[in-house]
Every structure is written in C-alpha cells, then in structure tokens.
Image (cartoon, coloured by chain):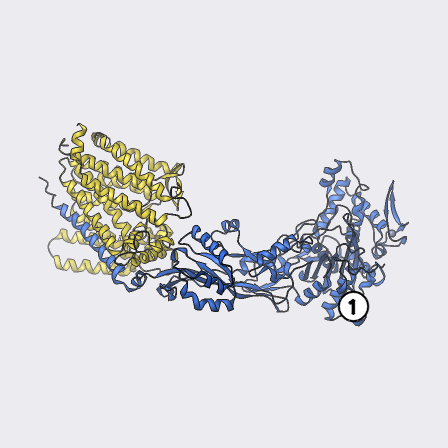
C-alpha cells in the first residue's frame, strides 16, 4: 500500500550509524586514549590557583620599602582524606591538635569536595619539612602565597596592609576574588590594589594516590600563568620618614612634608604609629585587635582624616584673600591694644602695638589685625550680604583644597571643614548672624578645621607663589605612567594675584627671622613659616607649625601638628625645622643637636619629660 | 472509547523505557548538582526541583492518556497557532537567560515556549501531510510543509536559540519518509557539508574544487542536455552559497556561536572559553575509563570542571561515573528507544498517527545527535538538552507531552482509522 515503506529502513539506518559513531568515539575517548586513561587510573586532577606576587614599592631614591616573601597555606579536600596521624601533622606544624580537629570538621561540613584552607602562613623552613611528610597525608596539599615584608618598620599608614577579602568585596569583584584571597586595605595597598595585585593564574596538576604531584595536565594547555603585580616608586623619602617618626615618638600628631614644585609627598607621619610587620603573618588578627583597641588610636590616619582648627597658620591665607578682594591693602595699618573689641566682645592678642602693614601683622600674628581683616572680607561692599561674603571667603579656601576633598592617592582622605552661610543659617537662622557672630573665624578658631595634609598643601602653595600640584604619594608606576598618575600632573592655580603671594612669602620669612618662629632657624638656609595654636576644648592646645625652605627655590614645605603640646613654637617648629635640615643638609648642625635630642626624648604621652613652655 | 480498552492497549514497554530515562536523569542531576552544604530536602537543591518537574510530568502524562485523542487531531492547527503566539509573546514579555531571550518567568520557575514548539509542529505537520489531497511530489505542497516547519524555527532563531532551531531540521526525516524526493535529503546533507567546508577552506579554492567536480561529472555523464543544465545549476547555486556563507556566519551567528564553531573546526585554538567546555567535557567523559568511577564518585563532576553539567553537559556525568559500559548502554538504550518508536509508527493504521510518530522520533534523534555529539566533540557547542535526562522543567514537560500523545494515539490505533 505504502510505496515509501522501505524508507523506514533508511531512517533506521541513520539512527544506527550515528549511534555506532558515538560508541566508537566513546571507545576512543574512554578506553583507547592514553591521556584520559591516566586520569581513569584513580588519579585526581587538581586545580591550583597561582597567586601572583604583589608589586614592590620603592621610595623616591629607589630604596626598596616593601617586598614579598613566600609563605604557604595548607589546604584540605575532605572527600580525599585517608586515615592519617593527626598528632604527627600538628607536631610538624606546631599547632594544637584540638583546634586542628575542629577546623577539619568545619571544612568537612563546608564541602567534602571543595578545598578549604586549614593552616595559614606556614613559614618556608617549616614548609620544607612538611613537604617531606606530605605523602603521609593524602587529601592535603599546599599552596604558595607571598606575604608583605617591610625592611623598615616605618610608613605603616602610607603603605597600608593586606587583609582577607570580605564577602562583600568578593561579591563586588565580579568573580576576581575568592574566599581566602587577600586585598589591600588602607594606604597605597588599597588605593593601588589593581596595580599591585597582578593577575591570578591557574594550574591543573595530576596527583596520584600517594598525594604526589605527577606534573601538569595536558602539557599545561589549560594553565594560565600568574602575572606579578606592577612595581611602584613612591614619592616618600624613607630616611626622612623614619627620622620624622623618631622625632614624633611619644607624641600624638602628624607631619606632612611636600615638595612644592611637584606636589610629591616626601613624608607623611601619623603618630602614634605601629610597626607594619604586626599586620602580616600569623598573629595578624591578634595584633590588629590590640591596635584597634588602643586608646591612642594608632590605626587612625591623622594626616588625612584628623581635622584641627588651624589657628594662626591660617592667617596668611586670610591676608591673601583680603588683599585680592581689596578688603585690605598691603599697607593697611592697625593699632592693636592687645585685643580686638567689638561691642561687648573681646578677642585677645598676644601682642600689642602699632601694626604698619600686613607683613608685620603676619610676623607678629596679630589677632586684632586679622579680626579686622576677616570682618572687612565678609562685610565687603562687593557682596550684598554677609552670607555672600562668607561664601566668597569659603570658595577662596576651596581653591587651596581646604574644606573640599583634596585629590590624592590615599583612601579615606578627609575634607577638613569650612563653614559657609548654610551652616550658620542652620544654627542661627537666616539673617540672624553677622561678621561679629563668627569673629573667631578671623583667627582660625571655632568651627573651622584643616587636615594636616591641607596645612602642608597651604604651605606648598604659598611657597610656590600661588599654585600647587595635588599632593600625591606615587611618582611612577612601572608599565603604566600615563593614566593612573595623570591627575597629579595638573597645575592648580589659585585665583589670587602673585604680588600678594610675594608679600606673604616675605612676611613668613620675617616670622622665622624675627617673629614667633625664630626657633626654626637653620644656619645657612632661608626659611619661611608660621606658628599656630589650635584651641582644644578637651585639653591642652595643639601645637602647629608650617614652614618651607629655601625661600628662593622651595624644596620642601612641611606642616607639623603635635597634639596637646601648647604653643606652636614649642614642638611644632623644632620638629619641622629639624626635618627640613635633615632633608636639605642630610645632617643636623652641631648647635641644633641639643634641640634634636630634646625632641627625641620628649614623651608627651607618658609625661616623662615636659619642658617649660618658652616664648 | 472506553478507558479499559485504552489501558489494555498501552505500550508498557515504551512507558518503562521513559521511566528508566527519567530515573537516570534524576540520578545524574543529583550527582552533578547536589550541594552538601544545604539540607537534603532543600528546595534550592536542583534535584529536588527536578523531582517536582518529574511529578508534574507524571500528572501531565496521565492527563494526556485520559483525554480523547480526537483532541490532538482536531486541534492540531489551533495548538500550533497557540504555541506560536506564546513564542512571539516572549519577545515582549520574555526573560533573558545567557543572552537568549526565550523564557517566561513565573515566580522562580522558568518556562521556555520554544521547547513546546517542536511538539506543535509535529502535530501540525502530521495533520497537514495526512490530508488525502496533499502530496509532497507537488512543489507547492512541499513549500507549504516547509513553511509550516520553518516559520516557528525562524522565530526561535530570532530569539537566539540556535540549538532549538537546529532540531527543526529533524523534520526533514519525516518529510523524506512521507514522500520528499531522496535527492532533497541528499541536497540537505550537501548544503550542510558545504557550510562546514566553506568555513574551513578559502572560498575561491572551494569554488575551484566545485568547478573541477562539475567538469568531471559533465565528462562522465554525457547523457542529455537536462543533465548539463542540472549540473551547471548546481554549480552556480553552490558557488553562490559558498560566497554568502561567510556573510551569514559573520552576521547572523552570535559571537559565542561563531567561536564555538571555529573551535570545532580547529581554526581557533586560543579561545579558552569556547573550547574549555568541550575539553573539560571530554576529560570528564574520558576519565571514566571502561568501568567508570562509580555512582556519585565523579571527581570532575564534583569540582564543577564542566560548566552547565546538570543541563546541556549531563552526559559527562554518565561518562565519568559509569564509564564506557555506561555510555554504550545509554546510547544503545536510546537507539532501542528510537527504533521502538519507529516500530510503533509503522504499525499505525492512521496516517496522522504514523506521521506524528516519525516527528517524535526525529525530534528525539536530533536532540540525541547534537547533545551527545557536542559533549564528545563531534558537534559544535550549541546548548540543547538531552531528552529526559537534562535538568529543566520545560524540556522534561515538552518531551513528556510529545511522547505520551504518541502513546495515547498508539493505544487507540485499533479503534479508529483516520
Ligand atoms: Zn595684636
């Protein structure tokens, strides 16, 4: 009936032919092919992650300040465990048997087939011994990692540290990080994580029943190499950094030193500091908790995050704004009766007498002169209201990077605080405050706050006669100079005429030569500076000093804050000038040795030595 | 028809085979996806979900067996139209998975209408070809049959699901069985061969070879003018085809599909992602050896070396855990199953039932062909499920419906003659 019935056999044939081809192919793959047979022989293919070494970090003179050393982790795949001598293994590793067993159980409940890190941070010597015994412990294997090693116990805050990734970071990384991986935390390690970390690789190895590696699988066709992280050259001068840290011993505070012509940070000290080595190796967690609990907050990065009322070191800025806005003139005079009086208000002044011009005002740090200046700035006829005057003042300060986010290459940089009209409108109500209400801003006290980094940048900007480069800590990145560091090559120009800067520099030179900062003088070097005292409602005032040298061709600008140390000339100025001398001359001149020793010895934290405040 | 008679005539053999496949599926889905960190009866465990799909499939099967089979014959075109509407619907309301927008999402379950399109085409084609007035000798009837098949195929291709589209080629076997000239089947194979060759060999060299072949055949046949014309036509057609294939390859196929095809052809060696799956899959299957590593002892299966192992690469688990004897048994069992369906087909008195049965066999065969071919490196990596075995509700449901409609038709084969 159906003439096409024979075609059934054709269709049937197609089915059979394909099935036979499949079976032949399977015969080849599963039985005949040797490389697969090797696997079939109860061998295990293990996927080993190759961790790249992190990039090295050098100082500005090419000294290595951060490198890597090998360290090993012991991993376990519970499903592959055979009976083994727990006591023996723990003895080799020098760990407690009880906690080891507990961890093993935890790994087992996590997954029978996925590897879990069971012992971390095995040192190379121990590893060599362990490697000989590995055949006794099937199911265990080791992975090499590198740990950060610090040749100098310095610059902990700048460098940051590495720590295990958090589940949130794993989630955000698009699959790059896995549990147990390390990531830069704080400092350059965090900011340049992508530069430093390199790229992980994968190696497939065959492992026999005796837990011995039998070489790479498939001739390494599927393997990828780990690509080491990129090396970086920082702007730090590690000798200066260490010297500064020594000077700051026993004191709470910050030092920031900048090369004005480039914005390169030469030293950044946060005191009290800690030895960066504490946050590597096996006791990392314990040490971290200890540092974290310390009441002096050694983990707090003061140069970036702490905000202090700048006191008198802000007066040069106010003078510049006043002259640019024609609120005062270079020859504006003022007769200081030892205080500034307005209505029932009195702002005291350390000095009294006739001030001939702005230079003298800065030189003697006359509070009355600057209260007058500040009122003229915010009550300037150019602006309709005091609110507009204040906001103009605020925007001038913003051009110096103050009260705004300072561009830099460390994470967690603070803004400082510059109050604007919004702020006072909120406190007092719109139109219910005037220049008298906020008079303390005239002498850099009250709500106003600068970070040490902003203070140092202020000094660098003035020493440059009106421009700066964003302060930064990395000079050069191997392989990649164009993009990462581009923003630090951009010259930021202050909208204030150069001639006002010339005057201000002149005044600051006077401060050191014949004013409040005489203690900072270095024989044979011209220097400009400004002392300051930050009022501290919680205790003794903070000692501030900013300075730069040489005046003609500035090589270094520096800001020093010593908390609870009183007047700026007491600690701030000696420390700043010693650092400059060290940087410029490489050594301290004999007459100043006593000053150096006094600074080394002063322990303000434990009050062992407290010299009488001098004037 | 009363129900007693229906159960009497049920082909229990094929139902048993179906059950065996579903059971194997559950076992290997468990082996390749169970997560020790979660409880055994956790809803997030894929095998628990698969168990739910199996349960609902059983209900579907029973439902089909008690429904009057007139439903499928009468409503064949309506079912066809409804499924096409659904397929079109995903364009607007669909959910994108792996770059393919062909899913409906209902709660946490996803449904893929293209899986059901094959069933509806099988029904519609059976209805169309069983019509007394239709004869595939006529060109316009050929065209209509092709349109019936390839309209939904085109829609599915537009959604990016090349795997499902390829399965529609299986209907050529049905057309062949029911009157399409054998030369067309050969032509189809030729086109397929040319497609592959044109991606491997430079097109000018290929045209040269074609020219040589055409010349040689002209020399050998020397029979009639018509023969010359046919050969010349074939030559021109093939040359045009060769020159356009590259265009199609570059512009129609998606990048990952291009890569996968290139890898298969050995042109691109360094595309890790594309050849990774196939290599890993071959390693997993190969490592099973002759006897396999034993149930639940597939280490590569455990380490998730093979991506998508519970869906498209499920055959790896069979290969790794049960070895060569297991894979051979499976392939043989599947061949037996296909043969059984052909036997069923040939014993139908109703032409509709017979054509439908061929449709079922062809669909299952193409899935078998592409899926296993892919895992052992004989076919490009195009994601389509292994019938009854792969994890996934849409595919299990659609294969269950496909098969049980056939079983129902077969059970009633003595009752009616259509
Ligand atoms: Zn005064």
Q: Residue at x 71, y 51 (%)?
A: A307
Across and down, in percent, residue A76 comes to 43, 58
Left or right of residue A231, residue A216 in this image: left
* Looking at the image, residue B201 lies above or below residue A389: below
Across and down, in percent, residue A477 comes to 57, 63
Q: Say which quadrant the N terminus of chain A sits in.
A: top left
Across and down, in percent, residue A2 comes to 10, 40
Residue sticking out furthest to the left: A1
- Chain letter for blue, please: A
Q: Residue at x 31, y 49 (%)?
A: B314
Between residues A188 and A168, which one lies in front from this camera angle?
A168
Write down the quadrant of residue B13 in the picture: top left
Residue under numbered circle 1: A525
Between residues A458 and A146, which one lies in front from this camera angle?
A146
Across and down, in percent, residue B112 comes to 34, 40
* Looking at the image, residue B138 lies above or below residue A598: above
Q: Say which quadrant the C terminus of chain A sits in.
A: bottom right
Visual hue assigned to chain B: yellow
On the question of residue A246 being in view, the answer is: yes
Left or right of residue B413, residue A159 in this image: right
Write down the quadrant of residue B294 in the picture: bottom left
């Amino acid at each position: 009936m159906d003439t096409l019935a024979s075609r059934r056999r054709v269709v049937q044939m197609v089915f059979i032919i394909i099935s036979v081809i499949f079976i032949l192919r399977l015969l080849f793959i599963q039985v005949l092919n040797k490389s697969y047979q090797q696997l079939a022989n109860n061998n295990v293919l293990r996927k080993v992650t190759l961790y790249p070494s992190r990039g090295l970090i050098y100082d500005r003179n090419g000294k290595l300040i951060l490198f890597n050393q090998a360290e090993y982790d012991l991993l376990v795949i519970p499903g592959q465990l055979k009976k083994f001598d727990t006591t023996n293994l723990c003895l080799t590793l020098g760990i407690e048997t009880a906690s080891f067993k507990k961890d093993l159980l935890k790994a087992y409940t996590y997954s029978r087939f996925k590897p879990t890190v069971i012992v971390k941070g095995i040192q190379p010597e121990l590893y060599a011994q362990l490697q000989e015994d590995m055949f006794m412990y099937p199911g265990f294997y080791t992975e090499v990692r590198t740990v950060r090693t610090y040749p100098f116990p310095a610059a902990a805050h700048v460098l940051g540290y590495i720590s295990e990734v958090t589940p949130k970071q794993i989630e955000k990384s698009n699959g790059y990080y896995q549990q147990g991986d390390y990531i830069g935390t704080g400092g350059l390690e965090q900011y340049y994580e992508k530069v430093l970390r390199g790229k992980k690789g994968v190696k497939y190895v065959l492992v026999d029943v005796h837990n011995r590696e039998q070489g790479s699988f498939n001739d390494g066709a599927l393997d990828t190499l780990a690509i080491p992280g990129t090396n970086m050259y920082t702007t730090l001068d590690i000798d200066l950094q260490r010297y500064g840290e020594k000077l700051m011993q026993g004191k709470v505070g910050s030092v920031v030193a900048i090369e004005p012509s480039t914005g390169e940070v030469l030293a950044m000290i946060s005191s009290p500091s800690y030895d960066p080595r504490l946050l590597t190796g096996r006791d990392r967690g314990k040490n971290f908790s200890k540092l974290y609990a310390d009441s002096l907050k050694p983990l707090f990065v003061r140069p970036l995050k702490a905000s202090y009322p700048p006191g008198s070191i802000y007066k040069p800025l106010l003078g510049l704004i006043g002259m640019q806005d024609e609120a005062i003139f270079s020859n504006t005079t003022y007769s200081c009766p030892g205080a500034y009086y307005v209505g029932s208000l009195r702002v005291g002044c350390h000095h009294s007498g006739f001030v001939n011009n702005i230079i003298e005002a800065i030189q003697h740090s006359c509070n009355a002169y600057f209260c007058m200046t500040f009122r003229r700035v915010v009550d300037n006829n150019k602006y309709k209201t005091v609110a507009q005057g204040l906001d103009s003042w605020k925007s001038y300060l913003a051009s110096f990077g103050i009260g705004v986010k300072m561009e830099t290459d460390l994470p967690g940089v603070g803004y400082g605080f510059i109050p604007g009209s919004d702020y006072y409108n909120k406190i007092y109500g719109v139109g219910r405050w005037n220049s008298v209400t906020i008079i303390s801003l005239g002498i850099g006290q009250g709500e106003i706050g600068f970070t040490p980094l902003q203070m140092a940048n202020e000094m660098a900007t003035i020493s440059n006669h009106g421009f700066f480069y964003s302060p930064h800590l990395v000079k050069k990145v191997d392989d990649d100079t164009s993009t990462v560091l581009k923003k630090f090559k951009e010259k930021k120009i202050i909208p204030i005429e150069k001639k006002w800067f010339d005057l201000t520099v002149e005044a600051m030179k006077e401060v050191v030569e014949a004013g409040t900062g005489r203690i900072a003088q270095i024989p044979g070097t011209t220097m400009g500076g400004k002392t300051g005292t930050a009022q501290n409602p919680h205790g003794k005032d903070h000692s501030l000093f900013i300075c730069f040298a040489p005046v003609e061709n500035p090589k270094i600008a520096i800001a020093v804050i010593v908390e609870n140390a009183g007047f700026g000339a007491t600690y701030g100025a000696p420390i700043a000038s010693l650092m400059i001398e060290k940087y410029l001359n490489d050594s301290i001149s004999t007459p100043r040795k006593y000053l150096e020793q006094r600074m080394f010895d002063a322990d303000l934290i434990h009050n062992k030595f407290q010299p009488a405040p001098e004037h | 028809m009363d129900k007693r008679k229906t159960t009497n005539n049920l082909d229990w053999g094929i139902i048993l085979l179906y059950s065996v496949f579903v059971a194997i599926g559950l076992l290997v889905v468990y082996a390749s996806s169970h997560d020790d960190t979660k409880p055994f009866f956790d809803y997030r465990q894929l095998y628990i979900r698969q168990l739910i799909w199996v349960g609902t499939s059983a209900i579907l099967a029973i439902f089909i067996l008690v429904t009057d089979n007139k439903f499928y014959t009468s409503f064949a075109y309506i079912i066809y139209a409804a499924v096409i509407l659904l397929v079109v619907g995903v364009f607007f309301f669909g959910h994108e998975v792996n770059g393919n927008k062909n899913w409906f999402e209902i709660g946490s379950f996803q449904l893929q209408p293209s899986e059901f399109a094959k069933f509806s085409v099988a029904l519609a084609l059976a209805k169309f070809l069983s019509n007394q007035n239709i004869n595939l000798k006529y060109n316009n009837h050929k065209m209509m049959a092709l349109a019936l098949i390839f309209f939904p195929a085109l829609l599915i291709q537009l959604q990016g699901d090349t795997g499902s589209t390829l399965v529609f080629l299986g209907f050529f076997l049905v057309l062949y069985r029911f009157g399409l000239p054998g030369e067309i089947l050969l032509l189809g194979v030729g086109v397929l061969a040319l497609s592959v060759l044109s991606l491997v060999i430079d097109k000018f060299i290929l045209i040269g070879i074609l020219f040589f072949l055409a010349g040689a055949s002209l020399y050998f046949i020397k029979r009639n003018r018509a023969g010359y014309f046919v050969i010349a036509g074939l030559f021109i057609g093939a040359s045009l085809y060769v020159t356009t294939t590259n265009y199609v390859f570059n512009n129609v196929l998606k990048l990952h599909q291009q890569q996968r095809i290139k890898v298969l052809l050995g042109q691109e060696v360094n595309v890790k992602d594309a050849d990774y799956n196939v290599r890993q899959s071959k390693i997993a299957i190969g490592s099973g050896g002759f006897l396999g590593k034993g149930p639940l002892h597939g280490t590569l299966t455990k380490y998730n070396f093979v991506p998508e192992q519970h869906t498209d690469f499920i055959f790896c688990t069979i290969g790794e855990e049960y070895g060569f004897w297991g894979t051979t048994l499976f392939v043989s069992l599947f061949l037996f199953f296909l043969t059984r369906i052909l036997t069923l087909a040939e014993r139908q008195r109703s032409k509709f039932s017979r054509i439908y049965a061929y449709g079922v066999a062809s669909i299952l065969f193409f899935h078998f062909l592409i899926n296993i071919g892919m895992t052992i490196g004989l076919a490009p990596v195009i994601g389509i499920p292994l019938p009854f075995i792969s994890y996934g509700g849409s595919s299990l449901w659609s294969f269950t419906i496909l098969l049980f409609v056939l079983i129902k038709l077969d059970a009633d084969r003595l009752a009616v003659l259509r």
